[in-house]
Amino acid sequence: MRSARLPAALRLLLCGSVLLAPIAAQAAVRVDIEGVEGEARRNVDAFLSVERYKARDDLDADTIARLYNRITDEVRSALKPLGWYEPTVEASYEAQGSNSWRFRIVINTGKPVLIGVAQVQIEGEGADDPVFANALAAITLQPGQQLNHGNYEQAKGDLLRNAEANGYFDAVLLRNELRVDTTKRSADVQLQLKTGPRYKFGKLAIDQSVIRPELMQRFVRFHEGEPYTSNQLLRTLFALDDSLYFSNVEVLPLLQERDTQALTVPVRIETKKGRRQFQLGGGYGNDTGPRGTFIWSDPRINERGHRLRVEVKASTITQSFDARYDIPIGDPATERMSVQLTQRNDTSGDLRTQELSLKPSITQLTGTWQRVLSVAATHTRTDSGSSRQTGNLLVPGISFASVPEGYLGEALFSRGFYADLIGAAHVLGSDSDFLRLHLQTERVFDLRSRWHLLLRGEVGTSWARDFDSLPGIYRFFAGGDRSVRGFGYNTLSPTQSVIDANGNTQELAVGGRHLLAGSVEVVRDLPRNLAVAAFFDGGNAFNHFGEPLAYAAGIGVRYRLPVVSIGIDVAQPLSQSGSPRFNINISPKL
């Protein structure tokens, strides 16, 4: 006898039903809630006892009845901290088969309690101290707002934490009252902080034998006798940690040993010696293809704090070797004298370039600007396929970059503004006369809570006595992930006609005198650290201002990590025919 064969789709459906049956059986209690959303719904879910029993399949009728009897009080307890003091609750339940129950809860929150009077006062020696301005500005208790007990508790905590962080260790709340009149649906808030005196930094004890004491002292962001602030302790900790001289750093205010007569707090710094480090990395990018990186560093060559760092990079278009020797000067967290040796092979457009340079430099910080003075002794080679040229140049340069307020030398993923001016002349022994200015800027604006606007611009211009003799490493190109998406890396530039060995004429991208590029990008946040973006890019490298630009537009997806955002973009060229181009990029987190 031949058995009938079930269709494949039906067999899968039956198997799925069998596998899901035990799961469905475990859903013994169903709770449907109507009338509240958002924070109110989350609070109700947290307070309801029945929510914690939903997965149980052994509940008897008596237990269900007890859970039902608690619902009204639990809902009211959940809504009261959010300002709803008189909600109405309609609840019911019914059995749905053996050991299965359904609860239905309908909530009418009623009118909320609003804040009538909100008084926050600072009294004592710190009454006029500006350090409390931010704390007061952050308090969200305002007349007319819906009462929220969490905001009230946060305001109390913020006042006390701000006082302690700025040396007012004896601060107390003389009044912390929240009075609610349910008949008038009104609440009055009274907060009164008495600061007491402000303490100062006391004696500093440092436990370290890694670098010279005078160099160590230059990392410290505070001095004995200055007003105490925990922010300066953190800045000292970050500066020492980022120096990489130490494997562990602790900056400890000894609050238990503070002098209540002299109003001082001693501080102790404890460290452990750091070690040589090496890193291996790899990845892939549309512009570079597969790439790899090796970094070796010795953050402490000697007790004077000299450092050595060696970095090797390799990809399909670039291979480089960099060795840099740093000597700390001035503020050792942000300022240094360096000597850098670079050997680099690169493909830009249709040019293959080689560079060997020795570059001494001095990096200094003034306010929110970082300045770098340098002079590079450089040997270059430029190969266009049809011709080769070499050059020896002495290239002085100066650059300025904006850095955040309180910058301590940490690596930056983007710079609000960057300007670089370099040049060379025959009178300095160079084979070329040129002057080159390169400007970059990038800003992010928050349009709304989930909407952001990213603007990026780049301008470059150069003057050369004989542009054909200008080495390829100093010419401008456009196109790629960080330029005009939709076009290949460094493919936008003036071209030069050459005849190959077969007698065919080719147009080669050889770089230009000038550069213009910009991008406008709108980003919309999504749940789970995701975001979507729409962008418009434009730009080109050219020899004469007024020449046409290339344009592209596209959309992308972003995935947010703690510091950076990883994106996948698809861009369509608009100024010329071409297929959409995918880009993978890493950029600062918005």
Image (tube, rainbow, N blue to C red):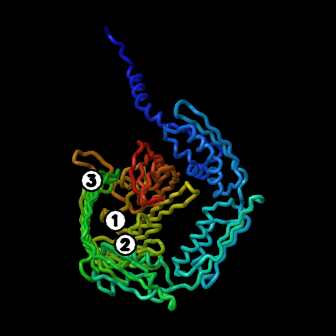
Does label 1 or label 3 sit earlier along the sequence? Answer: 3
Say if mark 1 contacts mark 2, CB within 8 Å. yes
On the picture, is 281 further left or further right than 447? left
Question: Of helix, strand and loop, which one carries label 2?
Answer: strand
Image quarter of residue 161: bottom right
Mark 2 surroundings within 10 Å by alpha-carbon count, few (fewer than 14), some (14 through 19), many (20 or more): some
Residue found at x 49% / y 38%: 58
The disc at residue 474 is: 1
Residue 452 numbered tag = none
Residue at horizontal 52%, vertical 52%? 525
Q: How far apart in space, not on screen, are marks 1 and 2 (Cα)?
A: 9 Å
Mark 1, residues whose alpha carbon is within 10 Å: few (<14), some, or many (≥20)? some
In-front residue for pair 472/440: 440
Q: Residue at x 48, y 76 (%)?
A: 231
Label 1: state its secondary structure. Answer: helix
Relative to residue 91, is residue 157 drawn left or right?
left
- Give 509 or 50, whichever is nearer the viewer: 50
Q: Residue at x 53, y 77 (%)?
A: 164
For the N terminus, the quadrant is top left
Discs 2/3, front: 3
Taking the image as drawn, is residue 21 in sight? yes
The circle on residue 316 is: 3
In the rendered view, tell whether residue 475 sits above or below residue 268.
Answer: above
Labels 1, 3: front one: 3
Amino acid on which disc 3 is placed: Thr
Residue under numbered circle 2:
422
**Quadrant of residue 20 within the rendered picture:** top left
How packed mark 3 is, by other alpha carbons closer than 10 Å (few <14, some 14-19, many 20 or more), is few
